[in-house]
Amino acid sequence: MLFRSVICIFQPLTQEDLVKIAKILISNINKRLKEKNLSLKITEDALEFIVKQGSNSEYGARPLKRYIQQEIEDQIAEKILLGSLKNQGEIVIDEEDGKLTFEND
């Protein structure tokens, strides 16, 4: 019996790839929020910040997904429960002084 080994070499994700992935992940959150009469808007500054904070060249997009879950999904849920965000309308996420800010109308 003859065995061959196969080696796969993966190229690291580019910044552009990570931005696309972040947009997809955020779009999925937005779809779930729409069911609850909420929508999500992320500024370009916030998107760049999210990609920078959530990326890791060694582990690909997995840390980005965790970062978005913890810093966007969890924060939105917590802020709605605490009353600092309304349970309807548009939530705007921006970056200010090295932190994400959440506001809604």
Image (spheres, rainbow, N blue to C red):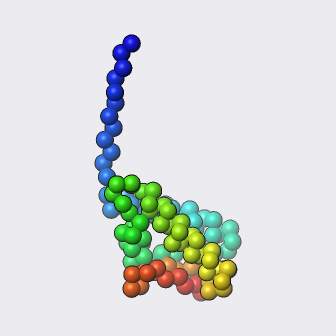
Residue beneath the point at 44% across and 60% down: 63
Q: Which of 58 and 86 is in front in this view?
A: 58
Q: 6 or 20: nearer the eye?
A: 6
Indicate left or right for 92 with 95 as reference. right
| Viewer can see residue 86 | no
- Give the quadrant of residue 87: bottom right
Compared to residue 15, the image places residue 102 above or below, namely below
Please state the total of marks drawn on the protein image: 0
Asked if residue 67 can be seen in this view, the reply is: yes
- Left or right? Give the position of 17 relative to 66: left
* Residue at x-position 56% and y-position 62%: 28
Q: Which quadrant: the N terminus?
A: top left
Q: What residue is rendered at 30% in x and 48% in y?
A: 11
For the C terminus, give its image quadrant: bottom right
Residue that appears at 39% across and 70% down: 53
Q: Position of residue 90 (x, y in %)?
A: 59, 79
Q: Where is residue 40 in the image (x, y as percent from the top left)?
A: 55, 74
Residue 20 coordinates in the image, percent (x, y): 41, 60
* Placement of 59 over or under 67, stated as above or below: above
Q: Residue furthest top?
A: 1
The answer to which image quadrant residue 103 occupies is: bottom right
The picture places residue 77, in percent across and down from the top left corner, at: 63, 74
